[in-house]
Amino acid sequence: MQGPEFLIPIVFFISIAVVAIIIRKFQNDERLALIEKGGDANIFNRTSKSNSYPALRYGLLLIGAGIGILVGNLIAESRIMDDEAAVFSCLMIFGGIGLFASYFIERKEAAKQEKD
């Protein structure tokens, strides 16, 4: 006889669906209230400028993560740190450096486009 562990995935997906439905309902209620008060609902349709170069951002993140795994494994091989701690910390550090570089490249390109 199976225990209750088969219910875990079912409950997980049902709860995700319920949360998504509730979020959508509150967004609709907010928009309706704004329209009833005479506001403009177009403020919800704004596109984010922060995702102007997604390929650059994800590419630099993955490059940083790859370098982080490589450096973490080198540190783990030299027995300076524990294996998991070395790989995980270097992965986070170099992934963050990749995102940081992406931010500055995007900012430089945005300044160049404003200038033109």
Image (tube, rainbow, N blue to C red):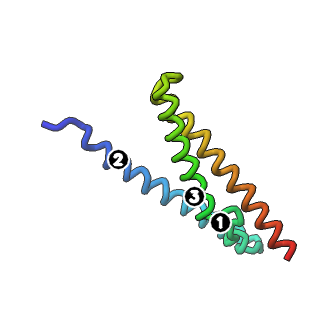
Distance from label 1 to label 3 (Cα)?
Answer: 9 Å
Q: Earlier in the sequence, mark 1 or mark 2?
A: 2
Pointers 1 and 3 in contact (C-beta within 8 Å): no
Kindly identify which residue carries mark 1: 53
Q: Quarter-wise, where is residue 55 in the image? A: bottom right
**Amino acid type, callout 1:** Tyr
| Location of residue 69 in the rendering, given as x and y in whole percent from the top left corner | 50, 41
Q: Is residue 51 shown above or below 5?
A: below
The crowd level at tag 3 (other Cα within 10 Å; few <14, some 14-19, many 20+) is some
Which residue is nearer to you in this view: 87 or 51? 87
**Amino acid type, callout 2:** Val
Pointers 3 and 2 in contact (C-beta within 8 Å): no
Q: Nearer the viewer, mark 3 or mark 2?
A: 3
Which residue is nearer to you in this view: 58 or 41? 58
Q: Earlier in the sequence, mark 1 or mark 3?
A: 1
Element type where label 1 sits in the image? loop
Q: Is residue 61 shown above or below 6?
A: below
The crowd level at tag 1 (other Cα within 10 Å; few <14, some 14-19, many 20+) is some
> Measuring 31% from the left and 49% from the top, which residue is drawn there?
10
Q: Residue furthest bottom?
A: 116
**Viewed as shown, does residue 15 lie left or right of 66?**
left
Q: Is residue 34 shown above or below 103?
A: below
Kindly identify which residue carries mark 2: 11
> Measuring 56% from the left and 34% from the top, which residue is drawn there?
89
Kindly identify which residue carries mark 3: 58
| Location of residue 66 in the rendering, given as x and y in whole percent from the top left corner | 51, 47
**Viewed as shown, does residue 108 lie left or right of 71?**
right
**Viewed as shown, does residue 82 lie left or right of 59?**
left
